[in-house]
Amino acid sequence: MLESVVRRPQRLLFALIAFMVVLFFTTYLSLSSWGSEQVRTHFETLKAAFNKNATQAAVHAQNEIASTISIGGQPSQAFMDGIKTIDDLRKYAVKGEDGNLYPPTFVPSEVNKLPRAKAGFIVLVRNNELEDMRKSMRDVEDRFNRKYGYPWIFLNNEPFTEEFKQGVKKMTRSEVRFGFIGPEMWGYPDWIDQTRAAESRKKMAEEGVIYGWSESYRHMCRFQSGFFWRHNLTMDLDYYWRVEPGIQLFCDLDYDPFVFMELNDKKYGFTISLHEYVKTIPTLWDRTKEFMKMHPDYLAKDHALHFMTDEPERLLEPGYNMCHFWSNFEIADLRFWRGQKYTEYFDYLDKAGGFFYERWGDAPVHSIAAVLFLNRSQIHHFNDIGYFHGPWTHCPLNRPKFHDNGKCLCNPEDSADYNDFMCMKEWWRTSIEGDPNQRS
Ligand code: GDP
Ligand code: MN
């Protein structure tokens, strides 16, 4: 024996390698229950190839992660389809570290293999809003995102604290990004007279306008109008869902709203629309009229002006009824803001100084642009997304469709849809779909 090794030293090397391979393989099997399961599945599959009576299960093991897709309400292809009994399943159970058998794991966003849009959640938020932020995230994740896994993008004009970062990361399995907003996106442009800006804030506080008189609020509105869509961290996205801390979602969302937007060429989606306080935008409509005089061709062929005036055939002349989409919720196409029409419109408004000399909100600014530059069909009311942002609630009214089946948890009587401060009437008279509650 020894003699033969001495004569052929390569045999020793060979024996050593063989020993290492066996050692590695057995260690792997004993340490990794998942690994051993894979090996077993593999053997099952091999056996199946040679044995005509082999169980379907082996074949299905290869298709383990087939999605559950409902076509016309019928499940067409089911997760681990073909495994009919718990005994069938036993073969695919995995031994946990506690020695118990666990059924195969089910991570909805991984099982859901449908193509995704280039999209994410965009959140402007302060460090001290962590707890409210976590509540918003819980609803968004539970009602929708666990099944899709879209990323969260947090933006702040101050550095995020470690506590904030860890706190929100724990609420999702998706990618999380943290972005800083520099002074070029959150500060005074050089053409702004800061004394005049301060006077306007003072006046608004004295007049008892409830909010919007603070300096940071005005920077916030300007950022939400002109900058989030060209921030470094959002440049790879086509669509976004704007989320704020402290909101609530009331209904399961069983489809992908970003893909919905793409399928239908929608550019702007909202849940609540209402009237703006006149005192915050006394000259916004006049500036808009001037802009449209310079660019009459920017008006969309099938624009939605009827939402904002009673006589849309007279275009902007009749004046503004203050109706706008509430922008604390938005599902929209970033490319609409990045486009020439909106960037020129924003620049024109920014030069006019109304973000600081008055208190122009991003909600009326976004809304006016959508109404002028988009066709009616490109603006969508997400009636099926039950939503709360203080003090208003939108809750879908159709009980059989949304409530009797357990989809939503809200009281239709709390829904502000028909409240006079809302603008759903004005939207439904404008939109192609009309009032969903009048549909049979
Ligand atoms: P409201 O909805 O009009 O009452 O205004 P909010 O106070 O909710 O502000 C709108 C959004 O901007 C929320 O997501 C806030 O978290 C965020 N926000 C407001 N002010 C600031 C600020 O000074 N800094 C940062 N980073 N976020 C802000
Ligand atoms: Mn808010």
Image (spheres, rainbow, N blue to C red):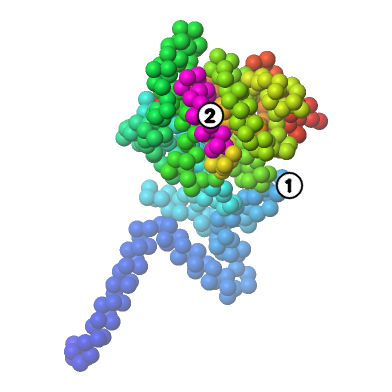
Residues rendered magenta in the picture: 342-362
Q: Where is residue 216 in the image (x, y as percent from the top left)?
A: 41, 23
Q: Position of residue 128 (x, y in %)?
A: 37, 25
Q: Which residue is under mark 1? A: 72
**Residue beneath the point at 46% across and 22% down:** 356
Amino acid at dot 2 = Leu
Is the residue 140 above or below the residue 58 in the image?
above
Dot 1 crowding, Cα within 10 Å, few <14, some 14–19, many 20+: few
> Is the magenta region chiefly helix, strand or loop?
helix
The foreground one among 174 and 156 is 156
For mark 2, does the 10 Å Cα neighbourhood hold few (<14), some (14 to 19), or many (20 or more) residues?
Answer: many
**Residue extending farthest right:** 440
**Residue 200 image-quadrant placement:** top left
Instruction: Residue 349: give its label.
Output: 2
312 and 205: which is toward the camera: 312
Please report the residue visible at 50 percent of the width from the left and 19 percent of the height from the top.
358
